[in-house]
Structures are given as structure tokens and as C-alpha cells.
Image (spheres, rainbow, N blue to C red):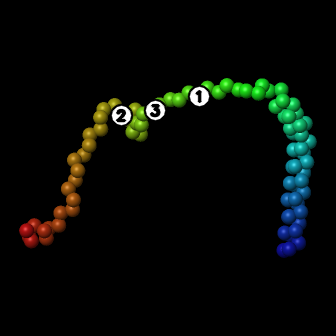
């Protein structure tokens, strides 16, 4: 079992190394060009923020066509022994 774990570990290390190597080959030149791109950018940038005020609306209120009817509150549990004692 130890040999199997060591084999799987070495296979995972080989796959990781392969992925790192080919990522460096593929994206390396573009990564090296980032300094030149940053140097060619202007020093300042204007950012404008817009803010939208929103009003809290109950969920699905837009879909209601008529106002909902509220049920009258149900009284609490009535115990029959309370009527006898009173």
C-alpha cells in the first residue's frame, strides 16, 4: 500500500510540474509584457460613481393584482377546564 501511495504522489507531482511548465510557456511572454503595458498607461484615471436608491418591496408584491386579505388572528388555545373554574 505504501508503494501505491508513493506512486500516486509521484504521478501527481509530475502532473503538477507539467501543468506549471506549459502554463509558463503559454502565458510567459504576455506576463513579461505587462510591465511595458503598465508603463504606457496614463498616470491618472477618472472614475465616476453612480448610485441608485432602491425602496424595499415585499417579495412578489409586483405579481399581486389585488391587495391580499389578511386572516383575522386566531384566538389562542382554549382549555375547557378554565370555563369551569371561572
Residue 2 shows which numbered tag? none
Q: Position of residue 69 (x, y in %)?
A: 26, 40
Residue at the spot of label 3 = 54
Q: Residue at x 89, y 40 (%)?
A: 28
Which residue is tagged 2? 64
- Dot 1: within a 10 Å radius of its alpha carbon, few (fewer than 14), some, or many (20 or more) residues? few
Q: Secondary structure at mark 1?
A: loop
Residue 83 visible in rendering: yes
Residue drawn 20% across and 56% down? 75
Q: Are the two marked residues, 3 and 1, in contact with CB atoms closer than 8 angstroms?
A: no
Q: CA distance from mark 3 to mark 1?
A: 16 Å
- Secondary element type, mark 3: loop
Question: Cβ–Cβ below 8 Å for labels 3 and 2?
Answer: no
Label 2, secondary structure: give it: loop
Q: Quadrant of the C terminus?
A: bottom left
Left or right: 35 with respect to 74? right
What is the x, y in percent for residue 54? 46, 32
Of the residues tagged 3 and 1, which is closer to the observer? 1
Camera-near label (3 vs 2) is: 3
Res 84 → quadrant: bottom left
Camera sees residue 60:
no
Residue on which disc 1 sits? 49
Task: Please identify, in this view, whether the residue under mark 1 or under mark 2 is nearer the observer.
Answer: 1
Amino acid at each position: 500500500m505504501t508503494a501505491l501511495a508513493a506512486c500516486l504522489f509521484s504521478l501527481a507531482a509530475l502532473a503538477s510540474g507539467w501543468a506549471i511548465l506549459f502554463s509558463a510557456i503559454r502565458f510567459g511572454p504576455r506576463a513579461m509584457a505587462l510591465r511595458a503595458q503598465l508603463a504606457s498607461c496614463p498616470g491618472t484615471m477618472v472614475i465616476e460613481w453612480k448610485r441608485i436608491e432602491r425602496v424595499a418591496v415585499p417579495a412578489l408584491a409586483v405579481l399581486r393584482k389585488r391587495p391580499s386579505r389578511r386572516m383575522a388572528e386566531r384566538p389562542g388555545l382554549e382549555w375547557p377546564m378554565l370555563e369551569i373554574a371561572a
